[in-house]
Image: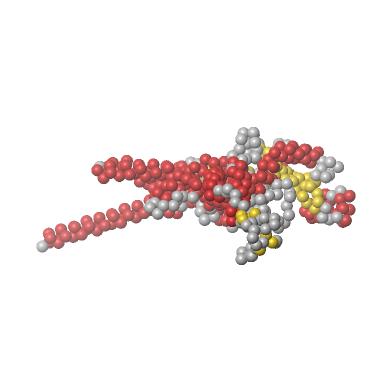
């Protein structure tokens, strides 16, 4: 019997499938020239088959790998703390207990991520977003490892946006055997005919649709009841249009990012799409250049039809015989090939591909005379060019990721008890990755210029230093450059140090006064 909810989901799936049709041919071309290992858009996949047969030049493939690796190192490096937590209120963030708790919580989350499969999954996410323009990261709870990540290729999913332009609906089309369906969902979900097929043909494949979407038909959510959670997870057997399993999620388990997109499109566009024509051209040019070079090295030969005794041998040290008295000879057929010109033209096209993938910004100009300050300045300038593009990635991938991970770990009580001031406080995320720090570098330069300007004035008029709040200057600099909170003493610790110094100074003054009085008494006695 057909389920109305299942039929509704299938109709929506067919609509999403139709809307995605034009993108599939685009993704297919991108995969062929930029990531051949994912050349399976239309399901044409044979295990172990060669994936790079169509490529004569690897500039496009290397550009994808370089940009993806650079993004991972600059945004979510496993060796650095690439984000921090904040209350959004400056005065509250300065509270000793609050600041310590925020720092400890951040480090706990970072360690949990590094101990999971996050780094492996996020690398595939970066590859997908710079090539297909759209990347999907699935975040699920795991009994053993707290959480588990899965980077789903865009060509395996069907997406829909909410009114804010954020992807809130993800559909999957799965191929499962009858045996897999029975093992996962139980034999009771199969019809009588399918149960008989299970015995006769257990490996017969069926289409299963997995829908993850927000529930809008409930007046009240209940996070303790799977079928009443805010996000539904429904598996449907397409042949019978029946629900195999229905459960739910407290929050959206998918984080979907687009490199860039137009207003009326759901799927994103990427640097690979921008340079697709260049990738096609460079491969044709490389093939033609190889053929021209081959003709120059081993040109075709002109052989008279009656002056040479066949067969003609063209191998090294070979001997060919010709009839005595004839002037006919075996001569090469020269062609006007200009291989150097072809190489110059190819280098121009390669440079265009590298520019599309920001390779010039990622690789600094090598100069032995550059000082450390110049190297850092050039690096920050290059990273600032990437920052506007990656703002969407932070909002669509990293922010939902951190919020969902925080909720999972909070539910498992993996954090220490928060201070009383944070009992009902929503936390903000502040990114402290290399790119985020590069954005603040300009502000740091202004800060340095200001200090350089006031230093001579303080030397001329020492009383002008009273205008500066030294403690605030140090706290501002530590926050600006993303220093760990452990390097800077808290206000209470600073108070203790100053009080101890004051007491020591008072003791020394008292001792000096007593010594002075003793000297006076001694002189008076004499």
Q: Quadrant of the C terminus?
A: bottom left
Relative image position of residue 407 (x, y in whole percent): 61, 48
Indicate the position of residue 123 as horizontal and vertical percent values.
60, 52
Residue drawn 20% across the image and 59% down it: 515
In this view, the residue in front, 394 or 322, is 322
Instruction: Give the percent coordinates (x, y) of residue 200.
Output: 88, 56
Residue at 45% from the left image edge and 46% from the top image edge: 380
Count of numbered labels shown in the rendering = 0
Let me know if residue 473 appears in the view: yes
Q: Please indicate whether residue 226 sits to the left or right of residue 419 in the image.
A: right
Taking depth in this image into account, of 298 and 46 the one nearest to the observer is 298
Residue at left 39%, top 51%?
Answer: 370
Please indicate whether residue 244 sits to the left or right of residue 490 in the image: right
User: To which quarter of the image does residue 393 belong?
Assistant: top right
Describe residue 194's horizontal placement relative to residue 248 as left or right.
Answer: right
Q: Residue at x 42, y 42 (%)?
A: 443
State the scheme by which the image is colored.
Answer: secondary structure
Q: Residue furthest left?
A: 526
Viewer-proximal residue, 315 or 272? 315
């Amino acid at each position: 019997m057909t389920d109305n909810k299942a039929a509704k989901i299938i109709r929506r799936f067919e609509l999403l499938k139709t809307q995605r049709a034009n993108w599939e041919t685009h993704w297919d071309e991108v995969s062929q020239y930029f990531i051949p290992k994912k050349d399976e858009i239309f399901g044409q996949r044979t295990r172990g088959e060669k994936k790079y047969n169509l490529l004569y030049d690897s500039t496009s493939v290397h550009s994808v790998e370089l940009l993806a690796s650079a993004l991972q190192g600059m945004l979510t490096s496993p060796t650095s703390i690439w984000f921090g937590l904040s209350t959004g209120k400056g005065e509250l963030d300065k509270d000793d207990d609050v600041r310590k708790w925020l720092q400890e919580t951040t480090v706990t989350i970072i360690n949990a991520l590094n101990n999971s499969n996050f780094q492996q999954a996020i690398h595939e996410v970066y590859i997908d977003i710079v090539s297909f323009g759209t990347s999907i990261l699935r975040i699920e709870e795991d009994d053993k490892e707290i959480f588990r990540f899965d980077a789903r290729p865009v060509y395996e999913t069907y997406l829909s946006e909410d009114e804010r332009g954020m992807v809130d609906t993800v559909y999957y089309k799965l191929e499962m055997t009858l045996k897999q369906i029975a093992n996962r969902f139980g034999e009771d979900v199969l019809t009588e005919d399918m149960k008989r097929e299970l015995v006769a043909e257990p490996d017969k494949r069926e289409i299963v649709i997995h829908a993850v979407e927000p529930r809008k038909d409930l007046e009240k959510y209940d996070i303790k009841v799977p079928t009443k959670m805010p996000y539904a997870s429904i598996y449907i057997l397409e042949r019978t249009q029946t629900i195999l399993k229905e459960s739910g999620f407290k929050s959206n388990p998918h984080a979907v990012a687009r490199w860039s997109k137009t207003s009326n499109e759901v799927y994103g566009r990427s640097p690979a799409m921008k340079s697709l024509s260049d990738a096609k051209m460079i491969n044709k040019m490389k093939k033609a250049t190889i053929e021209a070079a081959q003709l120059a090295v081993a040109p075709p030969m002109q052989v008279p039809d009656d002056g040479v005794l066949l067969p003609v041998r063209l191998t090294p040290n070979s001997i060919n015989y010709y009839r005595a008295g004839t002037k006919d000879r075996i001569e090469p057929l020269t062609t006007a090939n200009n291989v150097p010109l072809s190489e110059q033209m190819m280098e121009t096209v390669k440079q265009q591909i590298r520019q599309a993938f920001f390779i010039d910004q990622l690789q600094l100009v090598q100069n032995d005379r550059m000082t450390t300050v110049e190297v850092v300045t050039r690096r920050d300038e290059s990273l600032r060019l990437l920052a506007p593009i990656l703002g969407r990635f932070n909002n669509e991938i990293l922010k939902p990721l951190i919020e969902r991970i925080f909720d999972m770990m909070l539910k498992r009580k993996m954090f220490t008890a928060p201070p009383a001031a944070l009992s009902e406080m929503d936390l903000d995320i502040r990114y402290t990755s290399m790119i985020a720090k590069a954005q603040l570098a300009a502000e740091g330069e202004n800060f340095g210029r200001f200090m350089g300007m006031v230093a001579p004035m303080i030397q001329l008029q020492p009383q002008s230093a009273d205008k500066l709040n030294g403690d605030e200057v140090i706290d501002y600099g530590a926050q600006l450059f993303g220093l760990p909170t452990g390097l800077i003493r808290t206000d209470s610790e600073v108070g203790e140090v100053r009080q101890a110094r004051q007491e020591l100074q008072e003791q020394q003054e008292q001792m000096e006064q007593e010594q002075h009085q003793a000297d006076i008494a001694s002189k008076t006695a004499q």
